[in-house]
Image: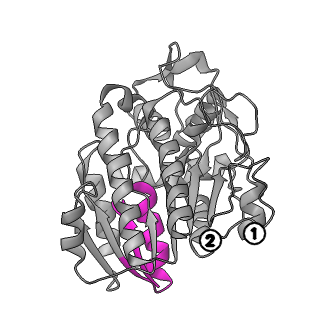
Amino acid sequence: MKILLTGAAGFIGMHAALRLLQRGDEVVGIDNITPYYEVSLKRARLAQLAAYPNFRFIEQDLADLAGVQAALGDWKPQRVLHLAAQPGVRYSIEHPHTYAQANLVAFLNVLELCRGWQVEHLAYASSSSVYGANAQLPFSEDHSVDHPVSLYAATKKANELMAHTYSHLYQLPTSGLRFFTVYGPWGRPDMAPFKFVKAISEGRTIDIYNYGRQMRDFTFVDDIVESTIRVLDKPATPDADFDRLQPRSSTSFAPYRVFNIGNSDPVQLMDFVSTIEQAVGREADKRMLPAQPGDVEATYADTSALRDWVGFQPATPLKDGVARFVDWYRSYYGQ
């Protein structure tokens, strides 16, 4: 298939592109290579993709619709995997306008492009952050997501609403992917797994927020990619059982779906730190701190809808995933 993949220089984007290229798809990747974290890592990810003759990369800001159209020319994809976004809960509090451009304007442009191309399917990254203040665990796609606690979460919820509108108005099949705390090789330096491994390896203190009471559903990147590509391969369809008097938020009368993609095995933050300590072979010096604004206390994915739809759900044990991440980290940074 001909697939447009946005966020190709990103963590999940690189892994997803590799899988698509290895199975023979033609992939055009778009990324604007922001300096949110080290650009050299993004370039190194792209170098992994450049070896494939069926890959083409375009450095372009998706918020510039005319620029994207000019860069793509007459090329049209059959399907679109939209993984580009400005990530980060805490960063969104300090830089709100960045999120309006990268997560709202850019997504609207992607929807408009998909409408014009009449693509077979748009699969896009949402986030477990949309559950916000909801404390009912495990999180189900049909739980309320009306109380976000960060602007980042609000933009991701907005993406789901925007997608539904286009699914309804233009019969554009869309599938939202609510990722739960992704980690693994080539991971993001701004996330806790990377920060902890780096600090412990260098003998520096790590900050433990909410005094270690947080719980996260850490999900290995290979499981994320397997789930994502299976969803991309199965375009969303209208739910024949959808009841407008008792509407579900995960399906619709339109060709629209939303899926949790998580490991369904939440881990206390201190247990996660212990797992990293064992993999690195060194005990961490810990500084206990209060919770930060925008953080939720726990995440836990109910992935039964994903399993029923594509016959797969993440299950990589944390110990195995962390060991693979630490091996990559030492190899990449020469430690």
Look at the picture and state if 230 lies above or below 274. below
Look at the picture and state if 306 lies above or below 71. above
The answer to whether mark 2 and mark 1 are in CB contact below 8 A is yes
Mark 2 residue type: Arg
Question: Which residues make up the magenta segment?
Answer: 1-27
Mark 2–mark 1 distance (CA, rounded to whole Å):
9 Å
Residue occupied by mark 2? 230
Residue placed most toward the observer, 173 or 17: 173
Residue occupied by mark 1? 311
| SS for callout 1 | loop
- Report the residue at 57% width, 47% height from top: 322
Q: Position of residue 108 (x, y in %)?
A: 37, 55
Question: How is this picture coloured?
Answer: one colour
Mark 1 residue type: Gly
Q: Position of residue 95 (x, y in %)?
A: 30, 31
Q: Position of residue 124 (x, y in %)?
A: 49, 59
- Report the residue at 42% width, 55% height from top: 11
| Residue 334 visible in the snapshot | no
| SS for callout 2 | helix
